[in-house]
Image (tube, helix red, strand yellow):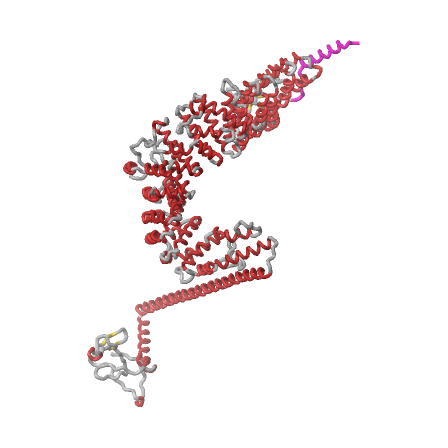
Amino acid sequence: MPTSDTRIRKSSNAMARVSKTPSRKPGLPVVNHKITAKGKGEIINPKPVDLNRVLRLLQDPLAVSLKERHLFTFKKVIKTYHKGFRLRDLENIIKVLDICTEKIKDHPEYTPMLYDLLKICGLPFLKEKTSDEVKYTDAAKQSLSQLGYLMRVPKADVRLQLCASISSFYNSATPKPPDTGLQPLSLSSRRRLLEQSGVVETLVLALALLEDQLAVRLQLLHTLQVLSCTSEVNCELMLKAQAAQKICLHMNEPDPSGQLLFRSSEILWNLLERGCPQELTEQLSSMDCILCLKEAFLNQLRHGYRNYDQQLRNDLLVITTLIAENPKAPLIESGFAQQLILFATFPEMKSHNPLTRNLKLTFNNEDFEMKKLLLNLVVVMSQDLSSVQLFREGRVMLALMYLVKPPDTAQSSGRGWTPVQQEELQLQALASLTTVAPLMLEEYMTCQANTCLLMLLEWCVQEGDRAQSGKFGYGVHKDAYFSQGHSFHGTGGRGSKKAQLRYSVRLLRSMVSLANPIINQDLCDQGAISLFIELLIQLGGPDDEDAIALEIKADLQLILSTLCESDIHRKELFGTEGVDMTVRFLKMNSAKFFSGMGHSKLILSTVDCVWSCIIGCFTNEDVFLEREGIFLLFDLIHSSPMTMHGVVLGALLELCDNPKALPHVQAWRGPDGQSAPHLLLQLWRQEEEDLGVQRDQHGRITDPVRPLVHAHQEEQAQESTPADTPSAAVVDVAGNQRCKIYGLFCKLGFEDLPGLVAEDYITLSIVSRYLDFKTGEVWEEISRELALEGVRPVTPDAEALQTISQATEDTAKRVSEQQSAILQRQEEEEAQKEQQTYAEIRSNHKQQELTAKSWEHFVAKTSDHKILKECKKRQEKSIESSRPKAKGKDSGTIYHHTHIPGLQTTTFCGRVMAVESTPAHLTGGPLANTDLALARVPMQGGALRKLPQATQQDLEHLNAVSVQ
């Protein structure tokens, strides 16, 4: 019998033979074609390793002690796949890697094998067919995902190679295809697979394993930087794994190379640019993260002198600004906010604080960028009102006002900035004050900011500028002003002081809009109203095509409106010059409303200026009416969009309180000859159409119960309104223009209005009852609210509500009947006009027919002698029949000869008539009336005598008389 040693030896020999004899599966051989440079195909038969046999060898419990054979097998696999793994082999390759990883724990000899296999993982995967990329997508994603878990191997070399392989796989260019005929995956396909695998999330979690391996941590941070620089998916996965917080908490660890802080800040930048800023802010808003950022910033500020260190310092400041936008961030509690404010006021404000005592700025570009970032940080921190006290303690207002001073008046000896940098900081300070100054009113008045800003405005319009440019604000003064350092704050103002003027006016508008009586009175006492009017006149007309100039004009008008709104004395200071300026701007070309340059804002501010600076002062109102201001307002309504009508109608309604304004309203005529009442009624119809009020095709009331309710009110009718909230009917009064149109008609009256048609009268019948309908609508809402809340009014109140509702409904029905009568009368008038038109047409046609027949008859007479003879016979017969027949002797009629001697005869065509005027000495004058008597007229004294009233028979006889 064979012994146990013999059996073991035989099994080992058999296993060796099995390992030497490769197994072949029946089937067709695989033929791979390689395209050579000459275009000919060469057939290559590589001998790939059977990974299934490799796995059986590595997993066989009987072959555990065959270490050399295992190493030989690993080397053979590495040699076979030295140009990359095939997609269809990835599943088995990952199993081989896992087995190698497990063996490293007890046998360090396997470490080089794992290292080489990971190195191959950095190469692009290979595909035999185009369809392999889709077929093995899931296997590839699973394989890449498993790679991240190899970070658990405690070998530094393995971890370094794993990070390098992932970086290479994600970012390296696609190499040339290998000679085996396999095609590597493209860069875009590799990146997509890596993003979908989620391996970056595993790498972030692996940061906790590398606290004692600085080199590996740096390599891993470099890999995360590569993965996050171009991929939004990777950034989202990193934020999901709390990457921002984990990286920030460890970025201040000791690092002689200085790469740790740099890599960390770069990753945070990538997450900021391509990730979710809100999620990043939430992760960095903890106290520990803020303290780490504080330590890193202070270290770079005090010890960083290289350009690289200063750039890193500024990057940390940007991240800090992002954190300051989160109101929950403990920036003040950590003490970081107070230190940042101290640096923001340096070097303008001197301090004995140890942080700034030895701090020196080189005033280079990086220090300049830090100064601008600190000023911007002050604006961001102002959103938290608790930081205002820190502003007061840090004298932020005084430092900003120091930067605002013009270059020629500032003490240049105390500054180290270049003139270009000073100009840009001046604009930055003005922009910052727009937000900060309204929070620090006491400090604003203490610094005499109003005086400083008015002096800045005067500097912007110095005589040198106007003399050189010919137009306000476009010249270059002889002072030390370069107008080159505007950055984005000076958009459109390069080469002039327009940017300074823009931000100065914006700051004044921000302060005046607070309606603080002390600040506004201080401005008026220094002559601000006349200065602003002068600026508006110098800036030019409303047709300017410069967006910045239009913004400055609108802001100046808004400042004037706020100052003069409730003070008669200030309106008087506005005066005739201000009225002329306003009228000039009201004449803006309506075609510019939709230019997108800001003309619409300018015209609205102009109307607001009319409302606040002119209306309420009789002197200004009279001047405005003399300048045809009413006509300009109605022209504006006619040509402007619906969004502007509310302000203009409100100004008109206030202006019509002046009795002198009503004749101007009635005298206005539009381009098409339409009157002001017609225009207002047209606006009413357009307003109701936009609101969705129920009307029929002729504009009549269709719902007598709710004659004014629109669609939005019906939607709100199903819900109960809180007691402190106005109801829909009340909100509707201010929500549209119908109330203002009704108020204007109350001024003009509802009768004897010019230029109205039937459609206008139908609308006017609704307008005249607007107050009654609105009152009934409010009571109807009260009844509905009681029903929704389950409240039953007492019997007298219920009867009163019912009576009011019935009265409103009856009024609406009467108005509807009146509208129907107006419509019927219009239809009758139109029918009558139509009949008259048809009669005129028939008459014209009849006349044309008679003319044509007369012409034909005339042509026939002239062309045919027989027809002419027949006509002559008919004419003679007609003459004969018209002669009077002889009467008897007893008739008493006296016959005279028709020829009177000495009588002048006048011959007509076919008739002869003799006429002699009565002598002037007998009638009493040349203009005396003359009575003619033809036939049967007795002659007495050569003059005609008036006979009694002629009978019908006499008239017939008169027609038959022919005077020879």
Secondary structure mainly formed by the magenta segment: helix
Residue 405: % across, % down:
36, 33
Residue 128 in view here: no
Res. 467 in view? yes
Left or right: 315, with 140 as reference point: left
Q: Which sits in the foreground, 706 or 147? A: 706
Q: Is residue 674 above or below residue 371?
A: below
Indicate whether 453 appears above or below 784. above
* Quarter of the figure with residue 157: top right
Q: Is residue 493 above or below residue 741?
A: above
Q: Quadrant of the N terminus?
A: top right
Image spot of residue 962 (x, y percent) = 27, 79
Which residue is at 33% across, 74% downward? Answer: 870
Residue at point 33%, 32% (across, down): 409
Based on the displayed image, in which of its 4 quarters is residue 505 positioned? top left
Counting from the top left corner in percent of width and height, residue 372 is at: 42, 30
| Residue interval drawn in magenta | 1-27
Q: Is residue 441 inside the magenta stretch?
A: no
